[in-house]
Amino acid sequence: MLREGEVRIPSGCAISGIFSKKGKMLNGRSIIDSIATMHDRSNGLGGGFAGYGIYPQYKDAYAFHIFYDNTSAKLACEKFIDKHFDVINLSKIPTKKVAAITNEPIIMRYFVKPLPNRLKESQLEENEFTVQCVVKINTTINGAYVFSSGKNMGVFKAVGYPEDVGEFYRLDEYEGYCWTAHGRYPTNTPGWWGGAHPFAMLDLSIVHNGEISSYDANRRFIEMFGYKCTLLTDTEVITYIIDYLHRRLGFSFTEVSEIIAAPFWDTIESMKPEDRERLTYFRNAFSNMLITGPFSIMVGFDGGLMALNDRLKLRSMVVGEKDDMVYIASEECAIRVIEPNLDKLWSPKGGEPVIVTLEEGLK
Amino acid sequence: MKRIFVNEEWCLGCHLCEYNCAFANTVSAGKSKANEMAKALKGKKIFPKIQVEENDGIYFAVSCRHCTDPLCVKGCIAGALSVKDGVIEIDQDKCVGCYTCVLSCPYGAIMPAEDGHVAQKCELCTRNSCGSPACVAGCPNNAIVFEER
Amino acid sequence: MDYQYPEFEVVRNADRCIGCRACERQCANEVHYYDADLGKMMCDESKCVNCQRCVTLCPTRALKIVKSDNTFRENANWTMENIKEIYKQAETGGVLLSSMGNPKPLPVYWDKILINASQVTNPPIDPLREPMETRTFLGQKPTEVKRDENGKIVNNLSSQLKLEVPIMFSAMSFGSISKNAHESLARAAAELGTYYNTGEGGLHKDFYKYGPNTIVQVASGRFGVHKEYLEAGAAIEIKMGQGAKPGIGGHLPGTKTVGEVSRTRMIPEGSDAISPAPHHDIYSIEDLRQLVFSLKEATEYKKPVIVKIAAVHNVAAIASGIARSGADIIAIDGFRGGTGAAPTRIRDNVGIPIELALASVDERLRQEGIRGNVSIVVGGSIRNSADVVKAIALGADAVYIGSAACIAMGCHQCRACHAAKCNWGIATQRPDLVKRLNPDVGYKRLVNLVEAWNHEIKEMMGGMGINSIESLKGNRLMLRGVGLNEKELEILGIKHAGE
């Protein structure tokens, strides 16, 4: 059977997210409880989490989480890392034995900073340098896979049901102001740990439920800008598009949502002139980054979280609020289980982004 | 009221309107138009109520214009011609074949019928089984149109 | 020795023929005639080109045209066609002329590509109940974002073409086709929100009013090109080549260079209008760049410039050069593209299929990261809406249709355009024939055709779960090949069915 990345695999999913606008540090336990409620939306072939604000002691260093198939891959990769980065700390990511999680690879964590001379030589800015190094590892070092590379955030994923994955990684020992989770229902996969979600690039992490129909149009376009879609998953291509639009072109997340889930022409034509002009421009100039087909995504980024549905809203997604807390999930039950008394609960319209950020001065 | 208009710019002089007219005003009950038309018209001289005039490469199909103030009706000595809902009709039972109408029509749109005893004219296919003018439906180039102007 | 038995036979059903003589009046080739002595219709089938005009107009369905069964001794190598052509050339010493697209049984890749549809994991979308968008913009796309001092986004797009349907009418010159055909195309383009193309014969004064839906062409003969002409259109197309006859220029026989055609082309009446094979100011890619910018300067950068090339062997490299030449759009014409007249050998043997050319150009431009520099328009036998969907999924932004448009106006592909006696009033300048195409009828039929295709495109898109044409563009995962070998699949960039 072909491994993830050699074949495109459609999957359905569950997603959940928790965010504290006041930057309260939340234990990883509640996100496990939330995603566990939607057990039936996954099939045990992939689960994962992203936590933000979890590494305050190393917040200026990139935290690389890496899977190794074997020690030779580890040696080759560590050689590469040493050549390009100053390693501030390295360790195995602590895990605990869970019966349902098997075949684990070697899972390592490195806190790194680009070597100043290397960075200068490359003529790139720090983020781009790091991205290119990560892509290099993932595409050229056989058996090594960097699955998390942001600052003060981390992705934890595995093959299994998400609640088991959460236990496995001992998430109740981490605290963050934002958590997202993903339970996967792929229709055909041998189950590879790297293929589980969230998919992350620097501090951008994405959990996604859906199967986009624009996949290959998006993939073939974004690959022009130096990205390589090695996993052939929607999440990967969506991440690259958001990274390109937000980090490289400088679009705000609202603007990003206007490009990837652009309103229909009919809607645009009834808008006031300024909006009409902007959206017409977006749909012309960035038409190749329009994403169609069903998706509900949650994009975690440094200091914020965006949730977005495809423009027809072909996937469920609800948002709940209580004081400074924002909860987003595929199903209402996943919110109620951790916060039964909500101030507000609604279902955002297709293409209408929900963006929450830390309050002023907290980031 | 809708009338038949002919645009000579698009008239090709193919004369199909004449044959369609002649066929429209025969009694037919067959299954295939092609067969019925052959049966009705084969080997016969036709007497269509629309006729293509041609000269020097210009073609123009002529049929009754259904004038609002028709000279033919005024001149009819037998009361055979009348205007009904804007359509000028001829009652061939009343017609005495004096051909005053043939002479008085400035367009040459009324002519003797096949038997030579009465006049005939276009009645917009209101009195045959076509429902709408057959010349219009059969024109290959939209040169003959049935419309309000 | 030069006697050739007629290619077609006219079969008349004597029981049905009513002697209305419509066939006789409608045949410009003078096949039919009435014999007063015999009192019946007769014919000289040696003149018949099988245009089907008489068959179509016969009110009693008394006529049909069949292929003659007169045969030479069978030979798979020396086919009758090969032998007859030798007789013709032995007699005349001339180059064989043909019209319309390559009729040879070479592979049609469109027919070996299949389209995907959604099942279970992703819902199909119903175009009758949900919005389904086919609007397309052609032109260069920016790679940078510009903002004003208030952070507001500034529109930094160069001039673009806006299409409500991803289908345009390809270049057919006034001269090669009639004024009524041009009027039909112009009016249809205006109603459909798309564009027609003047071809290389200039723009008739009466049609300047359709300028917003007109692409004006500049070809090597520069017929009818002047400042006002360039300013009249919405875009300017530099014609470097044509799929039906790559490597040679346009051919308009003197019989078609009459009256308004000669005036519009600005050449003497009756003269053969033979465009030079190259543009004599373009012997290399850097020269093309200069012409692109000359035209942009002349029109103050208000019009996108299209460069049209024939699909030839190294089309990808050529396209890459064009994408860096300042051109906004590349039009690629495949070897099945039609023509009003071309040397038979060239039409039938030069160039490559558009499917392969498109796939390799799109992939090459992406590899080089310059796909956004240009839009790609393809033509050269787009026969139906499925061909359009496949072309867009392979990577085209829009398509050009020429033969299909002619067929909508009545063409029966008799491939005798070069004889200038088109019985359907399309490829002729004889006034009595030209009037057979009433633009009121012609334009409506074109509108109907494109609207019908657009409905079908929407149905197919909906099936794939796509509700906007931009998500289909280059979406090769939506295609699968059948009966194609590894190399063909590799060039097309698609998987085999079942994979």
Image (tube, rainbow, N blue to C red):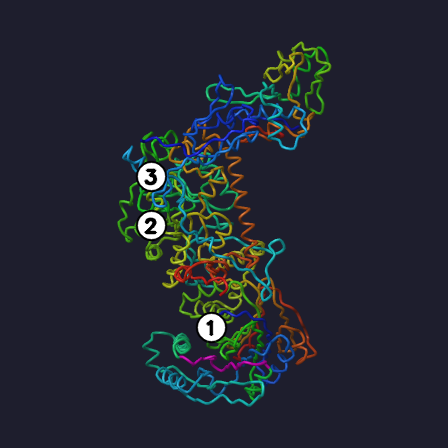
Q: Judge whether residue A149 is colored magenta.
A: yes
Q: Please give the residue where the numbered disc 1 appears in the rendered image.
A: A5
- Asked if residue A36 can be seen in this view, the reply is yes
User: Label 3 is found on which chain of the structure?
Assistant: C
The furthest residue to the top: B98
**Marks 2/3: CA–CA distance:** 46 Å
Mark 3 is on which residue type?
Ile
The furthest residue to the front: C73
- Asked if residue C226 can be seen in this view, the reply is no
B90 with respect to A79 (left or right) = right
- Give how far across and how far down residue B76 sits, in percent: 69, 12
- Give how far across and how far down residue C418 sits, in percent: 37, 35
- Give how far across and how far down residue C422 sits, in percent: 43, 33
**Do marks 1 and 3 both belong to one polypeptide chain?**
no
Q: Nearer the viewer, residue A229 or C143?
A: A229
Q: Do the residues labelled 2 and 3 touch (CB within 8 Å)?
A: no
Q: C167 above or below B1?
A: below
Please identify, in this view, whether the residue under mark 1 or under mark 3 is nearer the observer: 3
Q: Please give the residue where the numbered disc 2 appears in the rendered image.
A: C292
Q: Residues within 10 Å of mark 2 (few under 14, many from 20)?
A: many
Q: How crowded is mark 3: few (under 14 residues within 10 Å), some or many (20 or more)?
A: few
Q: What element carries label 3?
A: helix
- Residue at left offset 46%, top offset 83%: A67
Q: Judge whether residue C49 is colored magenta.
A: no
Q: A181 above or below C291?
A: below
Mark 2 is on which residue type?
Val
Q: Please give the residue where the numbered disc 3 appears in the rendered image.
A: C83
Mark 1 is on which residue type?
Gly
**Marks 1/3: CA–CA distance:** 56 Å
Please identify, in this view, whether the residue under mark 2 or under mark 3 is nearer the observer: 3
